[in-house]
Image (cartoon, rainbow, N blue to C red):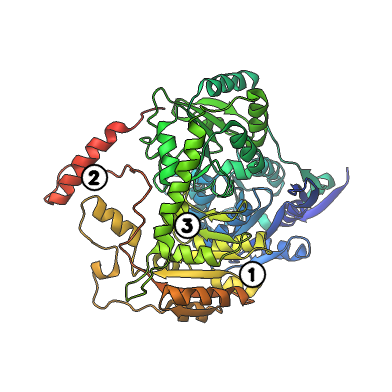
Amino acid sequence: MRKIRLTMAQALVRAMAAQKTVIEAASGETQILPFFGGVWAIFGHGNVAGMGEALHGVRDVLPTFRAHNEQAMAHAATAYAKALRRRRVMACTTSIGPGALNLVTAAAVAHVNRLPLLLLPGDVFASRRPDPVLQQVEDWQDGTITANDAFRPVSRYFDRITRPEQIMPAFARTMQVLTDPAECGPVTLGLCQDVQTEAFDFPAHFFDERIWTPRRPRPDARELGEAIRLLKSARRPFIVCGGGTLYSEAERELAAFAQAHGIPVGETQAGKSSLATAHPMNMGAIGVTGTGAANEFAAEADVVLAVGTRLQDFTTGSWALFQGEGRRIIGLNTQAFDAGKHNAQPLVADARAGLVELGAALGDWTADTAWTPRAVSSKTAWYTQAESYTEAPAEPGNALPSDAQVVGMVQRWSQPTDVVVCAAGGLPGELHKLWQAQRPGGYHMEYGFSCMGYEIAGGLGVKMAQPEREVIVMIGDGSYLMLNSEIATSVMLGRKLVLVILDNRGYGCINRLQHATGGAGFNNLLQDSFHEVLPEVDFAMHARSLGATSEKVSSLAELGPALARARASTKTYAVVIDTDALISTDAGGHWWDVAVPEVSERAEVRAARKAYETAIERQFVGN
């Protein structure tokens, strides 16, 4: 057997470079591309000598990208994988200690959203000769604990490489997890810094090219039969479309299935853009941030077909949304854990394969004759109502615009191929309800973990995955101040973003929630926080200091022309606008379970508690 003598780090990156993936275009044509789109690296004493030298050796086939923040580069890698439907992946390498721990939040984002991400943090010396080394976390009771153990609960697979030959079985397991539709998520390999540099005679076949084809598990015959029985018994069926629909590339099959059988569809934050807004059965967003149309039909449905969704509380209205008499749920999901949630009838399968087989078995069956046309009428009424929130006011006046009005202006300026990127705060609610997506992947929201700071880094990852599309990052001042460093990275890499920064001077979304639960305005808006002097942050100047072109506009009327200048720009362009922190779209939506104190001196809290106790009686308690 032919062998090649390499360090562990050299062997790892050479094996990574040999992995390929099959990409299927909408036309049906396929192409084979590298599975790893690159490696994000911030070097330190825990990885610069081993991984740094190894990555330099393969830089022509496995590019290395320098970032400015470890969490941000992992967000970019996660967004890259999401934009490419989990078909391609990026890796991230850091030093030990703070560099490694900065990845943990981003690992949780990938974990919750079921997205592949390879994390390669440096670790302590396996030999323990120089212990304790710089940045080493010591445990008095357990000599095997390092900072990297913090990754265990947010990794699908975790390993620590303490001998060079261990990388072979560890990497094999890594690839299985990163490419498996059910197990997909972040993998963490803690790379002991001395082991990175140690040599071993690796068998040459470890570096052979491997082509990974997406697995599409078909449904079990018994589960399929039971799902068909439930659907055929339904008079008021409803579909919840989750992110798994996009990951499975099942948007065409979903569109055909819903149309053929007259079933209205509600989209989760992750599933939005699976169907074009114009599709007659697309009722829009579902749940807490849902449209009036989608929630009306979800509440009445007797059978809910949940396709590729985790059914989290924002989707289900904290399990108070589905109120149909004798309602049943069918969980079409590759992951059995998700498919069986809340007493659902599981249908464990790939979304595309499952929809095709369900459709074939249902034949010409359709929903109740009154159900489908009513859905079309309700959808029309909703979007007529929504326009009143997104349209620019007739009289500009001196009032600050709402988030919804800014969303409307960006929508009118955008093109069908554009991608809007956002994450936590008030904007996800407005965008989920009001944004009209026209192409798959045109709506990119991180709301599984609702992670503030994802937006700019995530936008960069999307742009790297799809450089031909205009990427619009909508972000509030709070998230911007948390993590903005990758503006500089986007400029450095020549990956242009359009940033729309909405400044409401605080955490406006949580401020509204605070008031809704009876609380006083406290510690959310800057003016309600402890201060000696209120900061006057010049976001346009700050973005400019990081290399972007920028401007601040004073009104909605000025926003449109500024967005046109942003589109014409060849590098990252930031547009800043002040907005009203108190206004949100009150139409649509649904109750959300946010516990209210049982005892309070405030009458507002006591009233909110009484309303809360009434609301929780509507919750459906399952397992």
Q: Which mark is residue 495?
A: 1
Q: Secondary structure at mark 1?
A: loop
C-alpha span from label 2 to label 3: 25 Å
Tell me if residue 531 comes above or below residue 468 in the rendering. Answer: below
Q: Is residue 99 visible?
A: no
C-alpha span from label 2 to label 1: 45 Å
Q: How many marks?
A: 3
Q: Is residue 405 left or right of residue 273?
A: left
Q: Residue at x 68, y 26 (%)?
A: 360
Q: Is residue 373 visible?
A: yes
Residue 277 point in image, percent of width and height: 55, 50
In terms of depth relative to the viewer, which is nearer, 600 or 96?
600
Tell me if residue 242 comes above or below residue 559 in the rendering. Answer: above
The residue indicated by pointer 3 is 423
Q: Mark 1: give few (<14), some (14-19) or many (20+) Cα within 10 Å.
A: many
Q: Which mark is residue 596?
A: 2
